[in-house]
Image (spheres, grey):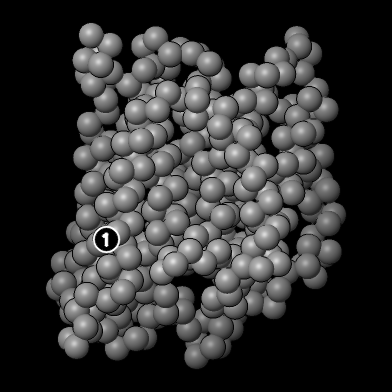
Amino acid sequence: MLLKRCLRSFDWISFAITLMLAGIGLLFIFSATYKAEQPYSIFFQKQVFGVISGLLIYVIFCCVDHRTLLRCGYFAYYIVILLLCFTIVKGAIGMGAQRWIQLGFLKVQPSELTKILFPAFVVYYLYSHPMTQTVTSAYFVPLLGMLAVSFVLIRQQPDLGTALTLAFSGIIMLWLAGLPRKFFIYSALIGMLGMPLAWHVLKDYQKQRIYVFLGYGDSRKERYQLEQSAIAIGSGGITGKGFLCGTQNKFNFLPESRTDFIFSVIAEEIGFMGTVTILLLYALLFWRFFVVISTIKTPLLQLLALGIILHIIVSTIINIGMVIGLLPIVGIPLPLISYGVSNLWVVFASLGWFNGIAMRRSYANI
């Protein structure tokens, strides 16, 4: 009886959209890495493995009770902090960054785990340390401290994109949890006063990305990636050049085409109509998130459900914004579509956990 009730509450709409977006991702990773002599690249093969194993992860997170996941997630976050420290010291190096741990033919990125485990850390802390009637900033110091430590460790790899995604998602969660307004006012003032120091802390390539966003830089150097993205998007027109026919992609003019800039590949090959369809799929997925969250009756469970999908929303907005030039370029993949097994696993885990809460929302609590 309970199983039937849970299955009736299963959010089939979000699950179907998840499958569609993952399928689109496979198609365009195939296109972005296609070569006549080797049609099925190693990247495409890894992504296929990531989707299949990700669906298994989805089912596991959907079936396991959310309270068990919450407790495990809280304590696992301390392990993730240790893994982040290990990554800085002994991690695998790639593309100038040291952010992976080598596991056979796969490289796992521990920083991705913070996106799903930090919400569990926050909610379990709030549950085990009930608020008094007067909430002060001091109550949130352990959470802010853990967020700050995580941000610094991830940025040190360096991985500013993941660090910013975690920071934005974490701050939104803490704001919704009741972090006093004066904290944000003081933080804004300190941030403005500390901008000169923050500028010197940034690495040279990060400064160049800000220059590019402001309109500066050589089109053959600093601005190259952004301008090639704009050419790819603009040349796609209304209906695109056709699958496997994107010239910016095929002639290797577009850097990071299978990862951060895969949206440009999609725009070039299936055009404006195709990209609008994908944007509508994301919009419908996010709408389903908020519909489900609005039906959850327990505030802490609402916060948990929102927290575990916030990174998907934030990453989607930032990735598309940077590809079309509305935001500075940072290393953030497009959820479910960009190449990256670690990111794919975390997204599937988040969506499975969320759907598990949706299945039990009529009687669940924390």
Say how many tags the image has.
Answer: 1
Name the residue furthest front. 104
Q: Quadrant of residue 32?
A: bottom left
Q: Quadrant of residue 41?
A: bottom left
Q: Position of residue 13 (x, y in %)?
A: 23, 33
Q: Position of residue 218 (x, y in %)?
A: 55, 88
Query: At 71% from the left edge and 67% from the top edge, which residue is drawn?
Result: 89
**Label 1 sits on residue:** 48
* Left or right placement of residue 202 versus residue 327 in this view: right
Residue type beneath disc 1: Val
Quick one: label 1, few (<14), some, or many (20+) residues within 10 Å? many
Q: Position of residue 255 (x, y in %)?
A: 42, 79
**Which residue is nearer to you in this view: 137 or 322?**
137
**Which residue is nearer to you in this view: 365 or 255?**
365
Query: At 64% from the left edge and 63% from the top edge, which residue is drawn?
Result: 87
**Which residue is nearer to you in this view: 157 or 55?**
55
Query: At 36% from the left edge and 11% from the top edge, which residue is drawn?
Result: 362
Query: At 25% from the left edge and 42% from the top edge, which residue is drawn?
Result: 17
Element type where label 1 sits in the image = helix
Picture layout, residue 165 above or below residue 161: above
